[in-house]
């Protein structure tokens, strides 16, 4: 699905800036921060401001088209993948990886049974990724 159709699916009026920012999120599943998105999209749209990037991401989050990740205490990152999944952040290189969720979490089922509506969940894991472990063994 292209960014234009994706935005329409989330009831967001497409604009050149919105399409470019969403396209970047969908194509670069690296969990970028605002500065990364701004630097990348600004190459094609030199009139783009960081404020526009911030406001656009806020709009995407409000409509459910993107998620804000706070796994890193220093930086807020963004994810175009809004389907249920967890994240793993490497404490050595800082890379954030998507991790699949295979089963319904027992606590979520209990909350639902007790009348709670779950709107979002966050599962974060931290440790050392396989690449960094390899590098550490080599040294």
Image: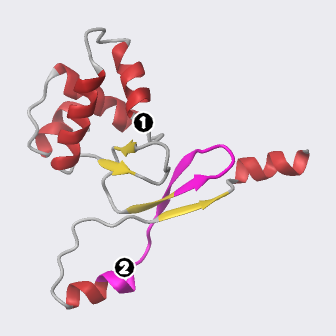
| Relative side of 97 to 32, left or right | right
Classify mark 1: residues with Cα within 10 Å, few (<14), some (14-19) or many (20+).
some
- Quadrant of res 40: top left
Q: Secondary structure at mark 1?
A: loop
Question: In x, y percent, where is residue 114?
Answer: 19, 91
Residue 19 is one of the magenta-drawn residues? no
Q: Nearer the viewer, residue 134 or 89?
A: 89
- Magenta residue span: 88-108
Q: CA distance from mark 2 to mark 1?
A: 29 Å
**Furthest-right residue in this view:** 139
Name the residue rendered at 21%, 67% in the picture. 119
Relative to 73, residue 43 above or below? above
| Relative side of 37 to 56, left or right | right
Relative to 108, residue 75 above or below? above
Foreground mark, 2 or 1, reads 1
Name the residue rendered at 41%, 20% in the picture. 39
| Relative side of 124 to 8, left or right | right
Question: In x, y percent, where is residue 81?
Answer: 35, 49
Classify mark 2: residues with Cα within 10 Å, few (<14), some (14-19) or many (20+).
few
* Screen quadrant of the N terminus: top left
Name the residue carrying label 1: 33
Q: Earlier in the sequence, mark 2 or mark 1?
A: 1
Relative to 42, residue 65 above or below? below
How many numbered marks does the figure carry?
2
Name the residue carrying label 2: 104
Q: Secondary structure at mark 2?
A: loop
């Amino acid at each position: 699905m292209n960014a234009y159709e994706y935005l329409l699916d989330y009831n967001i009026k497409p604009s050149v800036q919105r399409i470019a920012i969403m396209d970047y999120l969908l194509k670069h599943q690296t969990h970028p921060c605002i500065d990364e998105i701004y630097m990348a999209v600004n190459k094609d749209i030199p009139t783009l401001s960081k404020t526009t990037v911030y406001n656009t991401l806020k709009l995407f989050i409000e409509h459910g088209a993107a998620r804000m990740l706070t796994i890193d205490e220093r930086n807020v990152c963004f994810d175009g993948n809004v389907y249920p999944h967890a994240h793993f952040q490497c404490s050595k290189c800082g890379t954030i990886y998507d991790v699949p969720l295979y089963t319904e979490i027992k606590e979520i089922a209990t909350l639902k049974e007790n009348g709670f509506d779950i709107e979002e969940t966050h599962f974060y894991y931290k440790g050392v990724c396989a690449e960094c472990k390899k590098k550490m063994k080599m040294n």
